[in-house]
Every structure is written in C-alpha cells, then in structure tokens.
Image: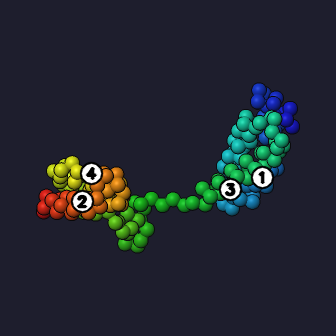
Amino acid sequence: MRDLVLLARKDDDKKVLILKRFEPLLKRACSLYIKNKSYFEDAMQEGRIVILKCIENYDLSSKCPFEAYVKRAVVNKMREFSVKANLEYVSLDQEITEDGENMYEIIPSDFDLEGERIKEENIKRLYDALYKLTKKQREVIIDFYFKNKSMVEIAQNKRCHYMAIARLKERALKRLKDEME
C-alpha cells in the first residue's frame, strides 16, 4: 500500500484506485455517524477529501499502516461532520410565534446602551483624574488596583514603610473621589 500511496502522489488514476478501495470504509463510517440521510452524500464527499489529504500527508517512514491512518482520519471527520450536520440554524428574523414575533424580539438583551455610554464616560473621567494625582499617588493606585499588587509588595518595591504607602493611597483615593464628583 505504501508504494501505491507514493505513486498516487503523482498519478490521479492511483488516487481514484485508493478512493475505491476505501469506499466501503466511507460508507460504513457515514452510516454509523450520519443519522440524517440527506447529508449522506455530503459526508461521503468530505470523507473522500480526507482520504486525498491522507495520501498527501502520510509519512511513508511511519510505522503506522496507511490503512489505519486513513481509518482514523475518516472516523474523526465523520464525527466532526455529524456534529455540524445535526445543528439546525434559525434566523433571528424568522417568525416563530403565532403573533409574528421573531427570535430577536423574544431573546432578552443584557446590553444597555445608555449604561455602557455612562460607564465609558466614567472610565474616561477616572483616567483624567488619575493624571491629576501626584506621580507617587498615581503609581500606588495603579500598582494596587490595576496590577493587583499588595500593599506590602508596593512598600517593598518603593523601599518605604507600609503605613506611608497606606496614607499615600488614602490621600490618592480622597483626591480621586473629589475629582469624580
């Protein structure tokens, strides 16, 4: 079979021969995994494509027989295809109730445009307020709240006492609060 694979890489007739040899495997895999028979021929085509890819990608120095390589690839493709084939897609605009409502109208939305806009404005105000702090205050706030460093860690990095950092953070928060109001 390895010789045939090598020849098939250059000769389309040999590829057809290999495809015919694996036709029973394809049919068996399709019948096992594809329950909706309207997808059967599509699944067969997908399987043929996989076999052609196997011909190109098979490592001739591999200890794994070509037949086993193809079987695994075909079975995996049929599993993947069966999952896709069993999904049913519904348009959000399709009417689904007697009143003519569609999915878009029925599905509750957690998105609050006004709330998002307010949130964006508050974030911008916070960044503006951060840059009105002193450099030391800003560094402590950024390290503590944005980089999730502990107060002890900040104090060690800045080579100062824990209480000095705590007071610096407290003054920075007061100033931020005043700027945000």
Dot 1, how many residues are within 10 Å of its Cα: few (below 14), some (14-19), or many (20+)?
Answer: some
Name which residue lies at 43% across and 68% down. 96
Which of the 4 quarters of the picture holds residue 40?
bottom right
Q: Split into 4 quadrants, where in the image is the N terminus?
A: top right
Q: Earlier in the sequence, mark 2 or mark 1?
A: 1
Instruction: Please tell me whether mark 2 sits on a helix, a strand or a loop.
Output: helix
The residue that label 4 is drawn on is: 139
Which mark sits nearer the N-terminus, 2 or 4?
4
Seen at 82% across and 29% down, the residue is: 7
28 and 65: which is toward the camera = 65
Q: Is residue 112 above or below residue 13?
A: below
Residue on which disc 2 sits:
164
List the residue tagged with mark 3.
Answer: 79
**Which mark's residue is nearer the viewer, 3 or 2?**
2
Q: Secondary structure at mark 4?
A: helix
Q: Earlier in the sequence, mark 3 or mark 2?
A: 3
Disc 3 to disc 1, C-alpha distance: 14 Å
Q: Nearer the viewer, residue 97 or 105?
A: 105
Instruction: Decide which of tag 3 and tag 1 comes sooner along the chain.
Output: 1
Q: In this figure, which residue is indicated by the disc labeled 1?
A: 27
